[in-house]
């Protein structure tokens, strides 16, 4: 009599399979395992877009550096403004443009014409906008009702000398770079770029760069293009190792080269349990496994661990599962390794316009389209949610996040939504 057959768990098995780790537990284990990569330097602000500050930036001066006009108009003394129902006459004694201050002070009954950004003349503390006055040559008439101290930006209003302008861990985008430039900061201390090695696995894969047509059973390698584009948003140094055959020795060599050259190794495909899937097996043999199956859909066969000094991720082979796994696990981990302080995108509530099926016990990331109808934020599914349907990602602008304790959604229920444009 033969020994009892004990099958390995598959993606169709109940979520209680022993290897399956809940999403929250998997994330906790991952973030315990990764840390900021060592190394930092100083770069010119002009070359710092996308880099992460490794030290606080302290304001060296007040911004703005002087009281200035927020509008085109006339600088006067608030004490000279007329009461409601009356008017007052002023004599225009000078003009002040941005970068060209007036040289005379403002006395009682006097005004100085100013443009936006002009230094406020001595004695003046209010700007009356040009649309609310009547001018006759050098005479100015102002009606009552103007607000004292209006339309003036005070020195240090944006930030004062000695204050922290930006904290370490901030990634520099357009607003941050403009802000630093306004402070006169020409160079910044930043963490070094991550080096990320990427390869796809599968004998069925054909590289686009090969230029050849597909044979029976073959598909083009789309995952490497998807992940490469996603990584570009983080400004990492990419080591593209191409396609690795479904072969134990080839997989081992790819692991060795990737771990030698990079801080992070990402493989797509080969993380399942079939005879031809060598990624998870090689990870066990050469490195350490943090987890390799997660209670999520799509993206259940997701491997995480270390090879040498490199953090390793084995992503599923199905195209949508690859992207979901990347955005929910890999990208936040990379952000932590880069030194960023904000790791996850915002999640907000939307009224669901679709009835959604789901099995309890796992987190699902369904593709949806979020928008606004009659002032209410609403979302609907893109339709069939197969892990191989990249079109469902193209049509979508968000993930509808269905949590482990949810068993489904009725039309009109509130759901959590994670917008794609925040996934970077």
Image: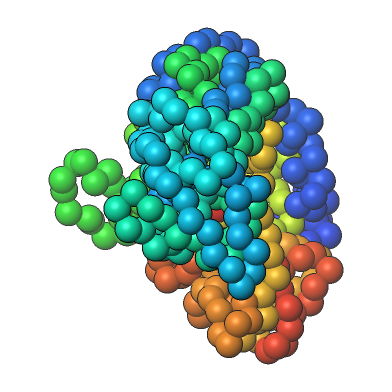
Q: Is residue 82 left or right of residue 207?
A: right
Give the residue displayed 56% in from the left and 42% down from the top. Answer: 108
Q: Measured from the top left, where is residue 391 in percent x and y?
A: 40, 68
In front: 271, or 247? Answer: 271
In the figure, is residue 413 to the left or right of 303? right
From this viewpoint, is residue 83 visible? yes
The residue that appears at 55% across and 73% down in the rendered structure is 370
Residue 303 visible from this viewpoint: no
x 36%, y 38%: residue:
95
Residue 299 rendering spot, x and y as whole percentages: 61, 55
* Residue 127, above or below 60: below
Residue 262, position as x, y percentages in the image:
50, 20
* Quarter of the picture holding the N terminus: bottom right
- State the residue in front, 79 or 412: 79
Q: Position of residue 382 (x, y in %)?
A: 50, 77
**Residue 383 in the image: above or below residue 132:** below
Above or below, 196 relative to 366: above
Camera-side residue of 7 and 267? 267
Q: Is residue 149 left or right of residue 201?
A: right
């Amino acid at each position: 009599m033969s020994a009892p057959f004990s099958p390995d768990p598959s993606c169709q098995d109940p979520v209680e399979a022993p290897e399956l780790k809940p999403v929250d537990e998997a994330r906790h284990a991952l973030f315990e395992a990764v840390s900021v990569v060592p190394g930092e330097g100083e770069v010119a602000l002009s070359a710092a877009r996308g880099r992460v500050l490794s030290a606080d930036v302290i304001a060296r001066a007040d911004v703005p550096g002087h009281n200035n006009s927020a509008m085109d108009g006339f600088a006067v003394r608030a004490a000279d403004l007329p009461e409601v129902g009356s008017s007052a006459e002023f004599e225009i004694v000078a003009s002040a443009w941005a970068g060209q201050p007036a040289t005379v002070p403002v006395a009682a009954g006097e005004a100085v014409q100013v443009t936006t950004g002009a230094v406020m003349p001595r004695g003046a503390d209010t700007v009356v906008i040009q649309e609310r006055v009547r001018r006759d040559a050098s005479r100015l008439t102002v009606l009552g009702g103007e607000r004292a101290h209006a339309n003036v930006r005070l020195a240090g209003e944006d930030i004062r000398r000695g204050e922290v302008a930006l904290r370490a861990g901030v990634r520099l985008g357009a607003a941050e770079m403009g802000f630093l430039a306004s402070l006169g900061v020409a160079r910044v201390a930043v963490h070094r770029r991550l080096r990320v090695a990427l390869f796809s696995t599968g004998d069925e894969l054909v590289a686009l760069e090969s230029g050849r047509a597909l044979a029976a059973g073959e598909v083009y390698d789309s995952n490497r293009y998807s992940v490469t584009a996603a990584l570009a948003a983080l400004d990492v140094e990419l080591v593209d190792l191409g396609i690795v055959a479904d072969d134990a020795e080839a997989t081992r060599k790819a692991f060795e080269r990737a771990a030698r050259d990079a801080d992070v190794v990402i493989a797509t495909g080969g993380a399942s349990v079939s005879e031809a899937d060598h990624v998870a097996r090689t990870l066990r043999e050469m490195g350490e496994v943090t987890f390799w199956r997660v209670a999520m859909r799509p993206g259940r066969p997701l491997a995480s661990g270390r090879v040498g000094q490199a953090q390793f991720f084995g992503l599923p082979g199905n195209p949508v599962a690859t992207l979901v796994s990347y955005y929910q696990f890999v990208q936040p981990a990379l952000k932590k390794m880069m030194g960023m302080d904000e790791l996850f995108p915002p999640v907000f509530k939307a009224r669901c316009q679709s009835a959604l099926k789901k099995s309890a016990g796992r987190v699902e990331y369904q593709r949806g389209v979020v928008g606004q109808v009659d002032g209410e934020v609403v979302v609907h599914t893109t339709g069939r949610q197969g892990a191989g349907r990249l079109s469902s990602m193209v049509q979508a602008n968000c993930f509808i996040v269905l949590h482990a304790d949810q068993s489904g959604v009725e039309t009109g229920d509130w759901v959590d939504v994670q917008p794609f444009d925040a996934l970077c």
